[in-house]
Image (tube, rainbow, N blue to C red):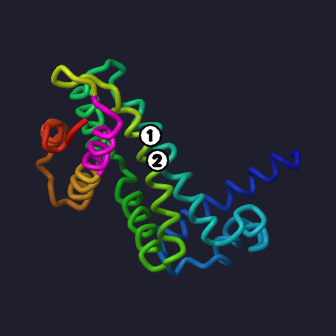
Amino acid sequence: MTRAEAKEHNRRALLDAARQIVARDGPRARLEEIAERAGLTTGAVYSLFGSKNGLFIALVTDYLGPHYDDLERSVAAGPDLVEAVEGLARHYRRLCDDPDALRHLSFELSLQDLALRDPELAPKLAASVRAHEERLTALLSGRAHAGNVLTLRQARRLATSLRALLVGLSQGVILGLADSAPEEYFAAVARALVAPDVLGPP
């Protein structure tokens, strides 16, 4: 391998190891064990990520990136806002049926636990999540609805509301609290957010 390939290989190994350890141990995740599982030393973590928190920030980005890539592919290419919202809702519902859905939820909750316990990590994790939520905002902005075009401000409000709603509903399904919640239900509830009092002024 070239030096660049070796660096990327080590980076990937550390991210994969961190994801497994964090999902299992949450805030008790030890840097030494992450490095050992990756077949590297803790020095490699500092060399590639700067710190333990730097590794966790990269872990969030590495996890959210493919998730939002899939979200973008789930949205209809046309300009209609309601179709886009329904596509997002249906996508979230389908994710609940993934055999690894419970493992993914455990990992997400572990990351949130890390952020709650570390005042330095919390704002960095929040910033990473917000950056990815901007991708959802961009997907919705400029779409036609009720004879108007959704502004960036309205799209941002809708993106925040949609993410909160769909994440909550998904967790309910995965945990067995909302078994009778088919795709149609997800789509109908999401459609309810495309209302003037939710979208707010342009």
Residue matched to label 2: 132
Displayed quadrant of residue 38: bottom right
Residue 185 is at least partly visible in this image: no
Q: Most extreme residue toward the front, as rendered? A: 201
- Is 151 magenta? The answer is yes
Displayed quadrant of residue 37: bottom right
Residue 190 is at least partly visible in this image: yes
x and y, in percent, of residue 107 in the image: 44, 63
Mark 2 and mark 1: Cα distance apart in space = 5 Å
x and y, in percent, of residue 39 in the image: 74, 66
Q: Which residues are magenta?
A: 150-163
- The three-letter code of the residue at mark 1 reads Arg
Q: Is residue 197 left or right of residue 69?
A: left
Q: Residue at x 40, y 53 (%)?
A: 100
Q: Is residue 169 left or right of residue 103?
A: left
Q: Is residue 140 left or right of residue 125?
A: left
Residue matched to label 1: 135
